Image (cartoon, grey):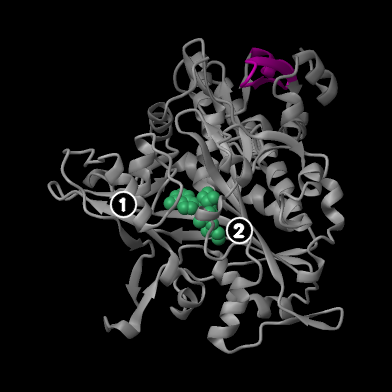
Amino acid sequence: MAAPTLEEITSLCIRRGYFFPSGRIYGGLAGFFDYGPLGVEFRKEVLDDWWDFFVRSRDDIVGIYGSIITHPRTWEASGHVESFIDFIVTCKRCNRDFRADHLLEDLGIEVKELTAEYLERVLREHGVRCPNCGGELTSPQPFNLMFTTYVGPKRTKASLAFLRPETAQLIFLNFKDVYITARLKLPFGVAQVGKAFRNEISPRNFLFRVREFEQMEIEYFVNPKKLDDCPLFKEVAGLEVNFLTAKMQEKGEKEAKAMTLEDAFDRGLISCKWHAYWIGESLRWLNRIGLPMSKLRVREHVKTELAHYAVQTFDVEYLFPYMGWKEIEGISNRSNYDLRRHQEYSGKDLTILDDGEKVLPYVIEPSFGLERVLLALITEAYRVIDGRTVLSLNARIAPIKVGVYPLVTKEPFVKKAREVYRIVKAKFTALYDERGSIGRRYARADEAGVPLGVTIDGQTLEDDTVTLRFRDTRQQIRVKISELTRIIGEVIENWERYSKAPMEVIAEQVGGKL
Ligand code: GAP
């Protein structure tokens, strides 16, 4: 089966109401998207699963929900005012702006450094001109990505504020209050989900690079003397991971090497054991929601791309068929850079006690971009079967879990189908559809990613059983209405086991008939 193109993915998302370009009736605003009826449920399913996995199921992580605009000193202390920049070049003829490193990458020219001098040199060496009109380009200029606004009625330097470019800083600002009020003990984490804003020079590739997006971030605080003291590591030590280290990249190697996390840690490739643990947990979650390990790799940042705060960063990359390997999550060791800077700038003591000693903890940060995860999931799920598009999303995160259909759109089928719909909808996101032939209704649901279908037919009226249809195999089993919600729940919970299993196995295990 041919891999989907970005155009096919975009078209499906708009056609089925996952996402719409924001302000579409006015021609759209580059870098902004709105969630449609399916998208908004999809977003919630993925966020909820993330929160369950990383927060609610654990004892060592609590959540916060910080403000989008906060004290402007935050961004001076964090280094974003000074260092959160990309380099822009403008065409002298048509006045279009381009991100200098992207311009080079689009021409297949490797970018080894992100400095104005380096980019200028490489642009000149290759004689790069405007891709729009062939005009001459300006020298690369630093461009700060933070959106600005003013707080209060006066538009002065004193009232200038920023929309947060990462959610992480709100965790650092609240660090001590959270530590005290939640009565935490090192090591512990603080999680947050929320919007972040970046005035990207060239937003592109649909949801991949946008100007307003959501992050799902954890700052996991560890005593700097206990960075390798990670009792949880054994849970992920044997996980086989595709690694592309900085050294390998410096040698010009392009292919990742598979090794266990334990092996990678023992070889000294990862800054500390807690860092290795969070790589493992991240991959476990991505895998559980539907991204296969074979299409995920962990690429270390080379020195020149490392953020100003990071000791070591790994990007978790997904193999997008239309873009190649691209980052969907960053996992950094930020040391105690942020807490130290906020301590300096605020004059407040941010140390906490551990074993009777005052410490300023180090932090390991798994940082996921929601839109990129959603795009990867939709891409991975996209299939064309017998000329029809099917979105094979994992039932765990599918926006609508069940479709309910009367086989014939006449009474008494419709009345019974509505009854069954009410029962199902009380527990799961569900849709009811009585328009068109049953084949067309299944096809619509398959394309929208609905994993299960319940059909009310002649036999239902005789013995109160319905058929339960599986999207990915298009097979059905017969189940009692009184058992329906239990069986659907069991199937969703164990989707990896049931989604492609033969019907006789499913019928035997969950309780149903062929
Ligand atoms: N707090 C760390 C941080 O913000 P980052 O690598 O700049 O690190 C984390 O961003 C994640 O946020 C990325 O892995 C990506 O998934 C997402 N992200 C960043 N910029 C984005 C953009 N312009 N559009 C969509 N997602 C973005």
Q: At which x and y percent is residue 106? A: 36, 37
Instruction: Give the amino acid at mark 2.
Output: Glu
User: Going 49% across and 21% down the picture, which residue do you hit?
Assistant: 3
Dot 1: few (<14), some (14–19), or many (≥20) neighbours within 10 Å? Answer: some
Give the CA separation, mark 1 to mark 2: 35 Å
Does dot 2 land on a helix, a strand or a loop?
A: strand
Residue 62 placement: quadrant: bottom right
Give the residue displayed 30% in from the left and 48% down from the top. Answer: 30
Q: Which disc, if any, is residue 137?
A: none
- Circle 2 residue: 217
**x and y percentages locating residue 165 in the rendered image:** 46, 63
Question: Which residue is depicted at the point 73% across and 48% down?
Answer: 281
* Residue 174 appears left or right of 109: right
The residue depicted at 72 percent of the width and 22 percent of the height is 464
Q: 438 or 243, which is in the foreground?
A: 243
Q: Is residue 280 among what the camera can see?
A: yes
Q: Nearer the viewer, residue 416 or 41?
A: 41
Which of the labelled discs sits on residue 120, or is there none? 1
500 over 342 or under it: above or below: above
Read off the magenta span.
458-478
